[in-house]
Amino acid sequence: MKEEILELRKSFELDLRNVDSLNTLNDLRINYLGKKSKIQEFSEALRDLSNDDKREIGKYINDTKNFMESSLNVLRTNLELKELNNKLSNEKIDVTLPGTKINVGSIHPITKTINEIEDLFISMGYDVLEGPEVESDLYNFEMLNLPKGHPARDTQDSFYITEEMLLRTQTSPVQVRTMLANTDKTPIRIICPGKTYRKDNDDATHSHQFSQIEGLVIDENISLAHLKGTLEVFAKKMFGDEREIRFRPSYFPFTEPSIEVDISCFNCGGKGCSLCKGTGWIEILGAGMVHPNVLKMSGYDSKKYSGFAFGMGPERIAMLKYGITDIRNFYTSDLRFLNQFDRVEKEWYHESKW
Ligand code: 2U9
């Protein structure tokens, strides 16, 4: 039996030399040391031997088993190390390679302008409120002193969904809703930005969909002086500290008196240039004192309360600020136009050396 065990050991040594992976190593372990292995058979055959032989052959079997086990363990450690090294070199990352350029988007110029105006009014204590774009004729027109058949409705032709529902032509219904909801008559100081719609033919200065920001302040003893002070701060923060403002009389059905507001031209400083068409002044918004009819319809005593309101088009503000001559640029998603407004992101991109 000793001879056979020696043969087994020799064949193990030969087979061991051919092992080149952890898988074949495992197969070898099962073959030579598993339950159905030859060494197991030898161990079982011991019981038929004399006590002396049992001791001698038994020790020989154990020595062989130990030899095979320790050989397999040494080889396993080597193979594991080899596999780890292979993995490390195959999956090596070259950190000196240039990175993949990621195209980052940028804030749309209209959103940028609205954000800037919002921040400015928030700093003066205003709340920012939004409302539905599909509105009732009641909130969009009637409550704003524009009854059916009023001639000023002609300038705000809209997209009607039914006789009574339409796409809002102004953000004013948001202010109406706010006044109606304010049953405690606490002071109101809000701006309402959002999309508005009018049935206009699109050209360089008109669009059937555009945005608006309207403001409303209501309290006791609010006067035109408060409106003037507020709009002066707005003009200076938006267009530069040297700006002056001027009021011209105007007409809106929802305000009385109504005014149009100009700022001194930021291009020529008021001397006259092509931007201000030689006048030295540029119109930026409309405003006025809230019409008593509007106050009454929304549940306010017009003898006790007064307020001012204003409205502006962020598109017009952005066109003036950035020198854009065609409003359609804002809506056609042409990257050659939009990329001009991503300077902040680009600077950040270069600084962080992506
Ligand atoms: C309520 C009462 C009064 C909002 C106002 C204007 C003047 C105005 C235009 C600016 C350019 C519209 O986008 S635009 O075409 N708006 O001139 N808007 S006063 O007056 C209100 C609003 C709500 C309850």
Image (cartoon, rainbow, N blue to C red):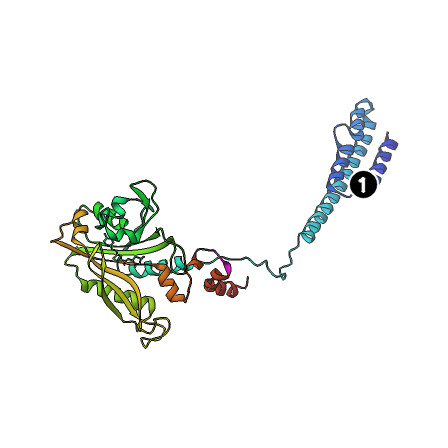
Q: Percent from the top left, x then y, of residue 111? A: 39, 57
Residue in front for this viewpoint, 119 or 70: 119
Q: What residue appears at the point 30 percent right and 54 percent down from the top-left corner?
A: 155
Q: Residue furthest right?
A: 3
Q: Quadrant of ligand 1?
A: bottom left
Does residue 175 appear left or right of residue 347 in this picture? left
Q: Percent from the top left, x then y, of residue 238? A: 33, 66
Residue in front for this viewpoint, 303 or 90: 303
**Label 1 packing within 10 angstroms: few (<14), some (14-19), many (20+):** some
Q: Is mark 1 within 8 Å of ligand 1?
A: no
Q: Percent from the top left, x then y, of residue 292? A: 16, 53
Residue 170 visible (yes or no): no
Residue 34 visible (yes or no): yes
Q: What residue appears at the point 74 percent right and 37 percent down from the top-left corner?
A: 26
- In the rendered structure, does residue 277 fall within the stretch colored magenta? no
Q: What residue appears at the point 87 percent right and 31 percent down from the top-left corner?
A: 4
47 to 138, vertically: above or below: above
24 to 188, vertically: above or below: above
> What's the amino acid at mark 1?
Leu
Tell me the quarter of the image containing the N terminus.
Answer: top right
Residue tagged by mark 1?
16
Residue in front for this viewpoint, 248 or 54: 248
The residue segment tinted magenta is: 331-335
Would you identify the image quadrant in which residue 315 lies?
A: bottom left
341 to 167, vertically: above or below: below
Q: Residue furthest left?
A: 303
Q: Secondary structure at mark 1?
A: helix
Q: Residue furthest top?
A: 48
